[in-house]
Image (cartoon, rainbow, N blue to C red):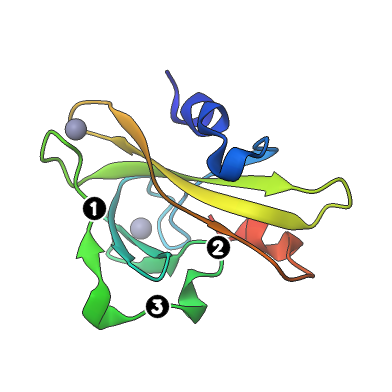
Amino acid sequence: MTLDGYVREFEAGGYEVTHVVESVCGGCGGRAFGVQLTDECAVRRTCLGCGAAAFMADSAEYWEDDDAEECACPCGGEEFAAALGVSCRPDGEVRWVSVGLRCLACGQCGVYEDWKIDYSPSSHLLTLA
Ligand SMILES: [Zn+2]
Ligand SMILES: [Zn+2]
């Protein structure tokens, strides 16, 4: 299954995933990342090509370096393709986001984090994959 398909089928929060946006490094166009997350539902991806780091969705607001842990696939792999799953309400505002990762070593997909969005405007989150 593709990462896009996996994230849609997962339906984080029980809501239809209306958009899946693949993560692409803004620095070099790379699509392979090391990924860290914290227990505050914050996710940061770091490009394996150029080292540029970016926060997914609104993670920058909740990020705590001290809490950050490296995501690892059950196979032990720590290199991923990443995508942001977004569930939008009919009015276009975001109600839920999820972070899908596909292990580049074994191909297994997973949703590693998801959280509720309860403010607006929120449509800019679609640009923060
Ligand atoms: Zn890069
Ligand atoms: Zn793996």
Distance between the alpha carbons at the discs numbered 2 and 3: 12 Å
Q: Where does residue 58 sit, x and y in percent of width and height?
A: 55, 69
The answer to whether residue 113 is above or below residue 9 is below
On screen, residue 119 versus residue 27, left or right, reads: right
Going 45% across and 23% down the picture, which residue do you hit?
2
Toward the front, the furthest residue is 14
Q: Where does residue 35 sit, x and y in percent of width and height?
A: 29, 56
The residue indicated by pointer 1 is: 71
Amino acid type, label 1: Cys
The residue indicated by pointer 3 is: 63
**Ligand 1 sits in which quadrant?**
bottom left
Toward the left, the furthest residue is 76
The answer to whether residue 125 is above or below residue 83 is below
Q: Where does residue 3 sit, x and y in percent of width and height?
A: 44, 30
On screen, residue 50 versus residue 61, left or right, reads: left
Crowd band around label 2 with a 10 angstrom C-alpha radius: few (<14), some (14–19), many (20+): many
**First along the sequence among labels 3 and 1:** 3
The residue indicated by pointer 2 is: 57
**First along the sequence among labels 2 and 1:** 2
Does mark 2 have its CB less than 8 Å from ligand 1? no
Q: Where does residue 113 sit, x and y in percent of width and height?
A: 41, 52
Does mark 3 have its CB less than 8 Å from ligand 1? no
